[in-house]
Image (spheres, helix red, strand yellow):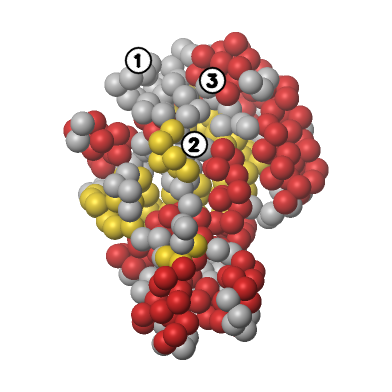
Amino acid sequence: MDRIEINSLTFEELKEFMLKLGEKSYRGEQVFTYLHRSKCIDIDELHLLPKDLRENLKVISKVRKMDIYKKYISKIDNTVKYLFLLEDMNIIETVVMEYKHGYSICISTQVGCKMGCSFCASTKEGLIRNLTPAEMVNQIYLAEKDLNINISNIVLMGSGEPLDNFENTLRFIDIISHPKGHNISLRNITLSTCGLVPRIYDLAEENLPITLSISLHSPFDDERKKIMPIGRRYSIDELIEACKFYVNKTNRRITFEYTLIENVNDRDIDVKELGKILKGLKCHINLIPLNPISEYNEDRPSRKNIERVQKELMKFNISVTIRREMGGDISASCGQLRRSVTQKNK
């Protein structure tokens, strides 16, 4: 029988788990706080629990662990990139970025990805498996302990598609935001998706005050299909309708990620159409200069052209920023470093 992964259980699930063991529910609270506030993983050291309960927990449950495989620190801006080694020997990556307002962490939600976006290194080897909630929170706890910092913002924008790992992602959000645990504000969590339309509706029904970020990358269906295979399943019209539903349900502004690719989606016709389809929607556009990878033979636009796109979009009364690039000397962009390591190990 598989043992229960107790650091993947939510606060309420842990209390219920203890009741099923014949214990008082407060024992679940003690375990939850030990795992998610103290960030400890050794049940033997949880001395608030009776010894017989600790021994029983070691038999019927387990604490999911991971280790730092490699660590890279940028000489440019102190961005830190981690490769974490999972229990099954798979590797995931995590990035910690330092800003004036505090530390942000970009975590992975899957090992690999099946979405197939043409310019993304994460997806080139396909999806290997989903991460558990424990493997998501462990990325944060290990980074915090290693760097002796407190993370203030979490971005689910590393390897994987969070909405393709929907239930585990929701449980992760529940765990990491709970007052008895890490207690991070839901408003400081950003979830990035390539546009799984049915799941956007499902997420809207959860009515969480997180930030939803959607990868758009082209305002034209034919062009978007070439860049993002998800465009073959859901049209831009369907995606925008889902976004409108999300905004109306949550009253939260949506961020649209738009990777600028020279002479592919940065032309005047692209900019005008993008402004047209997003005008009036409660949203923000984040322009991202392309990070070239060997498997995608396109170039990033010049800085002058990037700024031109920003100015033209702002004419539609849309908030537009250009993403600050960080960790350029340590392959800090999604999937680049993990792929370079896994390719070497083959």
- SS class, disc 1: loop
Camera-near label (3 vs 2) is 3
Q: Are marks 2 and 1 in contact (CB under 8 Å)?
A: no
* Left or right side of 293 for 38: right
Q: Provide residue 25's location: percent of width, then percent of height.
A: 63, 80
- SS class, disc 2: strand
Q: Provide residue 215's location: percent of width, then percent of height.
A: 56, 32
Q: Is residue 207 above or below residue 315?
A: below
Residue located 42% across and 70% down the image: 59
What is the total number of numbered labels drawn onto the structure image? Answer: 3
Of all residues shown, which one is farthest toward the front? 1
Relative depth, front residue between 274 and 342? 342
Q: Are marks 3 and 2 in contact (CB under 8 Å)?
A: no
Q: Quadrant of residue 272?
A: top right
Label annotation for residue 229: 3
Label 1 CA crowd tier, 10 Å (few <14, some 14–19, many 20+):
few
- Rounded to the nearest angstrom, the CA distance separating label 1 from label 3 is 17 Å
Of all residues shown, which one is farthest toward the right? 248
Q: Is residue 212 above or below residue 136?
A: above
Q: Provide residue 45's location: percent of width, then percent of height.
A: 36, 82
Q: For the residue marked with disc 1, what is the amino acid?
A: Asn
- Rounded to the nearest angstrom, the CA distance separating label 3 from label 2 is 25 Å
Q: Is residue 88 above or below residue 119?
A: below
Q: Does residue 273 appear in this view?
A: yes
* Left or right side of 246 for 53: left
- Rounded to the nearest angstrom, the CA distance separating label 2 from label 1 is 22 Å
Q: For the residue marked with disc 2, what is the amino acid?
A: Ile
Q: For the residue marked with disc 3, what is the amino acid?
A: Pro
Judging by the rendered image, the residue that carries numbered circle 1 is: 297
Q: Provide residue 234's location: percent of width, then percent of height.
A: 66, 22
